[in-house]
Image (cartoon, helix red, strand yellow):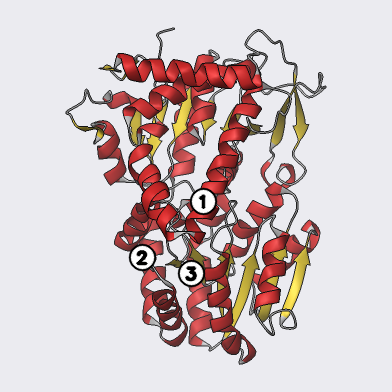
């Protein structure tokens, strides 16, 4: 196999940057070992949260042999990592689409095999990313000088991809006993890169966000892209080595698909938008969904929004869903900081059956009061937001992966410069606001949703029009591409 750190889509990497990549791999190998020759057993285990609704089974590595066979004909692997909640959420969308299309989805989280070099390397980088994300919300200086430039330009450089490709060589061992002819959709670049290094034959690299970065390149895979703007940027590798004009990506290596959205949400767009407009017309409480990301950032901003909306909640003009994911400490801090929150709240804590039942009942509405959600299980923590979206009127979120979902969105300040383009895209598509870069503008936009009909009505209209145009069909198309690679 060609050394993917020396030449990237026909663009030669400098000797200095290549040596830097080699040293990066050597550093991780010294610290975490090199298990390239390991013969890890694999087995399938039904996913406790997602098998029932979506038919998902986990691929477990180095836990002994299992009894469940792989579906060689209809199986499709969703390769992912936990880094924040975004890549898990995209993975759930892929699994949902695969299940809806009649395929068998397998979940392969490369950050869940603790005795492997693969997971140790990913875990170390994940810890650094989460720390940086939280620090960026506490220190304006750190955010300005370190975090924004790294997320906006640092990850954009072709030399960064060279190092990632070398590091991914240390991740390939976990694929040794995974059937090589089952298609794989990577919802983070590392599973896609590692799968290619391991000899997986049919790999789709589902690129997130709306800001082209070399970080997301996995040469040898078909790259799927959610927006036209981003597709063009990747096609010419725009700005990935300063102002140099680079060799473009081959036309058959990237495909515009639209947004990666769960089948259950896409199929119910018209009904859910009609219900939102009916609630507004009937004067029922407007339900705001606040979801804390996997890095646990932005707690202070959420506290300001909750404090601002509590009077409207008591007057039954508003209702709140607050999903703190798997960060119970965030809820404890919110209760401590916001007088009256605890007394106004119904807790749905670590009881998945209760959360499911509430989410289904709430679709028929109306909802009153504050409903708080915390789940220790990562799948429940992430999927909870998806379940609540159908009965929510407005989603308050930073403009990351949730920027692409078919629900009216109020965008909070970004966490990382690359996220700004998610808000820009949503505003242009008409299903989200501009990014509110400070608390006063966030509260202003909250009041506009609450006090008038225009924003909600316009966004619901655009969401329905976008569905007709196929904007939210990206997950279906990614699965179809993966299966077509095998069958053609």
| x and y, in percent, of residue 19 in the image | 39, 15
Can you say which quadrant of the picture contains the N terminus? Answer: top left
- Residue at the extreme bottom: 315
Return the disc, 3 or 1, that comes first in the chain's sequence: 1
Between the C-alphas of marks 3 and 2, the distance is: 10 Å
- Residue 94: numbered disc: none
Res 374 seen here: yes
- 260 and 154: which one is in front? 154
SS category of the residue bearing label 2: helix
Apparent side of residue 87 relative to residue 441 in the rendered image (left or right): right
Determine which residue is flagged by label 3. Answer: 273
User: 10 Å neighbourhood of mark 2: few (<14), some, or many (≥20)?
Assistant: some
Between the C-alphas of marks 2 and 1, the distance is: 32 Å
Between the C-alphas of marks 3 and 1, the distance is: 33 Å
- 226 and 417: which one is in front? 417
Return the disc, 2 or 1, that comes first in the chain's sequence: 1
Q: Are marks 2 and 1 in contact (CB under 8 Å)?
A: no
Return the disc, 3 or 2, that comes first in the chain's sequence: 3
What is the quadrant of residue 62 in the picture? top right
- Residue 133: numbered disc: 1
Mark 3 or 1: in front is 1
Apparent side of residue 433 relative to residue 356 in the rendered image (left or right): left
The answer to whether residue 232 is above or below residue 437 is above
Apparent side of residue 58 relative to residue 230 in the rendered image (left or right): right
User: 10 Å neighbourhood of mark 1: few (<14), some, or many (≥20)?
Assistant: many
| x and y, in percent, of residue 167 in the image | 51, 22
| x and y, in percent, of residue 14 in the image | 29, 17
Determine which residue is flagged by label 2. Answer: 462
């Amino acid at each position: 196999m060609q050394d993917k750190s020396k030449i990237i889509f026909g663009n030669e990497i400098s000797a200095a940057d290549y040596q830097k990549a080699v040293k990066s791999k050597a550093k991780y190998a010294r610290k975490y070992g090199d298990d390239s020759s390991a013969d890890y057993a694999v087995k399938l285990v039904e996913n406790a949260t997602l098998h029932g609704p979506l038919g998902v089974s986990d691929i477990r590595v180095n836990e002994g042999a299992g009894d469940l066979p792989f579906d060689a004909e209809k199986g499709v692997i969703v390769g992912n990592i936990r880094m924040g909640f975004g890549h898990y959420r995209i993975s759930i969308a892929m699994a949902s689409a695969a299940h809806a299309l009649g395929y068998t989805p397998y979940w392969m989280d490369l950050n869940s095999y603790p005795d492997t070099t693969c997971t140790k390397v990913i875990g170390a980088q994940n810890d650094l990313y989460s720390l940086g994300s939280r620090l960026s919300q506490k220190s304006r200086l750190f955010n300005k000088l370190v975090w924004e430039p790294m997320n906006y330009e640092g990850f954009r450089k072709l030399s960064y991809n060279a190092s990632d490709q070398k590091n991914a060589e240390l991740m390939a061992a976990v694929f040794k006993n995974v059937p090589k002819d089952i298609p794989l959709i990577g919802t983070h670049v590392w599973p896609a890169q590692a799968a290619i290094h391991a000899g997986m034959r049919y790999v789709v690299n589902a690129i997130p966000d709306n800001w082209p970065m070399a970080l997301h390149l996995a040469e040898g895979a078909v790259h799927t892209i959610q927006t036209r703007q981003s597709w063009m940027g990747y096609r010419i590798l725009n700005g990935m080595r300063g102002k140099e004009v680079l060799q473009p990506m081959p036309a058959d290596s990237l495909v515009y698909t639209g947004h990666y959205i769960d089948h259950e949400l896409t199929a119910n767009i018209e009904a859910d938008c009609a219900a939102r407009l009916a609630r507004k017309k009937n004067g029922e409480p407007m339900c705001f969904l606040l979801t804390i990301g996997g890095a646990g950032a932005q707690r202070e901003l959420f506290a300001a929004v909750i404090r601002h909306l509590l009077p409207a909640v008591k007057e039954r003009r508003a209702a709140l869903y607050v999903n703190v994911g798997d960060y119970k400490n965030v809820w404890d801090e919110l209760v401590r900081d916001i007088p009256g929150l605890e007394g106004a709240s119904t807790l749905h804590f670590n009881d998945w059956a209760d959360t499911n039942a509430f989410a289904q009942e709430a679709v028929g509405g109306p909802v009153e009061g504050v409903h708080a959600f915390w789940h220790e299980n990562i799948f429940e923590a992430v999927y909870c937001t998806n379940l609540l979206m159908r009965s929510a009127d407005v989603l308050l979120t930073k403009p990351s992966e949730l920027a692409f979902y078919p629900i009216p969105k109020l965008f909070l300040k970004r966490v990382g410069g690359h996220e700004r383009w998610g808000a820009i895209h949503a505003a242009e598509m008409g299903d989200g606001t501009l990014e509110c870069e400070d608390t006063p503008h966030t509260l202003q936009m909250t009041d506009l949703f609450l006090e008038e009909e225009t924003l909600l009505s316009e966004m619901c209209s655009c969401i329905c029009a976008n569905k007709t145009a196929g904007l939210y069909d990206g997950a279906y198309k990614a699965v179809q591409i993966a299966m077509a690679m095998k069958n053609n």
